[in-house]
Image (tube, rainbow, N blue to C red):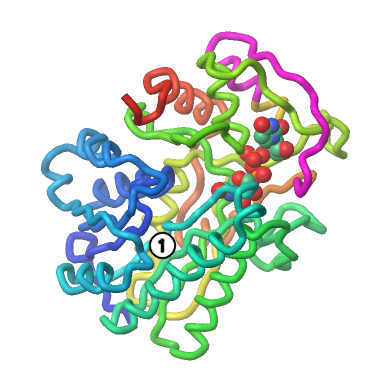
Amino acid sequence: MSLEKTPAETCVLVTGGAGFIGSHTVVELLEGGYQVVIVDDLSNASEKVLGRIAQIVGAEAAERLSFIRADVADRDALETVFETFAIDRVIHFAGFKAVGESVSKPIEYYSNNLGNTLVLVDVMRAYGCKDIVFSSSATVYGDPDALPLTELSPKKMATNPYGWTKWMIEQILSDLVVADPAWNVVLLRYFNPIGAHGSGLIGEDPKGIPNNLLPYVAQVAVGKRDCVHVFGNDYDTPDGTGVRDYIHVVDLAAGHVAALAWMNGRTGCEIFNLGTGTGTSVLEIVKAFSAACGRELPYVIEARRPGDVTANWADCTKAHELMGWTAKRGIAEMCRDSWNWQSHNPDGYED
Ligand code: WQD
C-alpha cells in the first residue's frame, strides 16, 4: 500500500523525462508542487530541454528538479538513483517509439523497451517502491470493432513491434499486481498527442523525416518540407482520410498529474484512456494547421500506409469520473501551439 503524501512530500522518478511527453509532464509536476527526478539517456532528447523547463516553471520550482543522464536499463545507475533519492512513484516514458523503425529493428525494440521496464520494476521492488504509471498507447486496441474505444474494448493484435512492446509491458505490469497486490499500477493509453507548451519553449523534436502527421505538417508550414502526403482518401470516413483522436500534449501531461493524485494511497491496476473523445481527419488537420500558420498548406493524396486503421477515438468517461480529468484544448489550440513551437524553433532544440 502506497502511503498518502502531499505533492511536496512526493518524489517522482520520470524516466524519459526529457522527451516530448515527458518534458511536458515534468512541467506540470513541478507546477503541481512535486519533487521530480528525470532519468534520461538523451538518446532521443536534448539536454537543452532542462533549461527550457526551468525557464517555464521559474527558479524556485526548478530547484525541485534533478536530472540524471542514464539508460534505465543500466541497473547500477538506477540503483544509485534510488539510493540518492527517496523515490515514491515512477512515471515510465523511456522507450523507443518509432513505429516504422520498430519493424526493421525488432530486437532493439524488444530489448530496449521490455528490458528497461524489467530492470526498472526489479529495482523499484528492491527499494520498496511499487507505484508506477506507464505510458501506454491506444495502439493496443488495434483495428477497433466499435467506436468510441473504452478501457473495456478488447486488446487486439499489434501491427508492429513498437505496438507489441506497449501491449506486453501492460501485461507485465498487470501480472505484477496479481503476484503482489501491494503494487499500484496505472496504465495510461494515449491517443494521438500533438501540440506543444503554450510558451513555445518545449515541443516535439523528431529526428529525420517525421513519421507522425503533425510534426510533418508543422515542417511543411515552416518550409522544411514541400507538401503534406495524405496517406489514403478512400477510407470509410466523411472525407475519406484517416480519423484520429488528437490530444494536446499539455492536457495529456495534466492526465499524468491527475493519475498520480488518484493513485495516492491505492493499490491495484487501473487503465485509463487519455484522449478528447473527438475524431479529426487528416484533411481537417491540414486545414486547421493552415489556419494556425496563416497559409494554405499544400498536400497530395498518396496510397494508404500499411498498418493504419481507418479511425479511432476514445471514450474518456472513466478518466473523468475517477480522476476528475478531462482534456480542455481543441484542435485549433493544438495547431496554434504546435505552430508557435515550430516557428520559433524551426530546427527543434538544435542551434
Ligand atoms: C495519423 C493519421 C495517417 C503521416 C502513431 C502510432 C501510435 C502513437 C502515435 C507514438 C493517419 C495519417 C500520417 C503523414 C498522413 N505512437 N498520416 N501523412 O499512426 O495514428 O499513431 O503515432 O509514438 O502508437 O501508431 O499517428 O500521426 O502517424 O498518423 O496522412 O505524413 O495521419 O495515415 O491516418 P498514428 P500518425
Give the quarter of the figure containing the C terminus: top left
Identify which residue is drawn at 54% across, 83% down: 175
Q: Residues within 10 Å of mark 1 (few under 14, many from 20)?
A: many
**Quarter residue 266 falls in:** bottom left
Examine the rendering and report whether any part of residue 278 can be seen. Answer: no
Residue 70 lies in magenta, yes or no?
A: no
In this view, 207 is above or below 130: above
Q: Quadrant of ligand 1?
A: top right
Q: Nearer the viewer, residue 262 or 181?
A: 181
Report whether 140 appears left or right of 183.
right
- In this picture, which residue range is highlighted in magenta? 286-309
Report whether 7 appears left or right of 93.
left
Q: Nearer the viewer, residue 50 or 332?
A: 50
Residue sitting at the far bottom = 179
Q: Secondary structure at mark 1?
A: strand
Residue 232 in picture, x, y percent from top left? 81, 33
How many labels were placed on the picture?
1
In this view, 182 is above or below 161: below
Report whether 332 appears left or right of 91.
right
Residue 115 in picture, x, y percent from top left? 47, 70
Residue 36 in picture, x, y percent from top left? 24, 56
In this view, 309 is above or below 142: above
- Write down the residue under mark 1: 92
Examine the rendering and report whether any part of residue 158 can be seen. Answer: yes
Residue 307 lies in magenta, yes or no?
A: yes
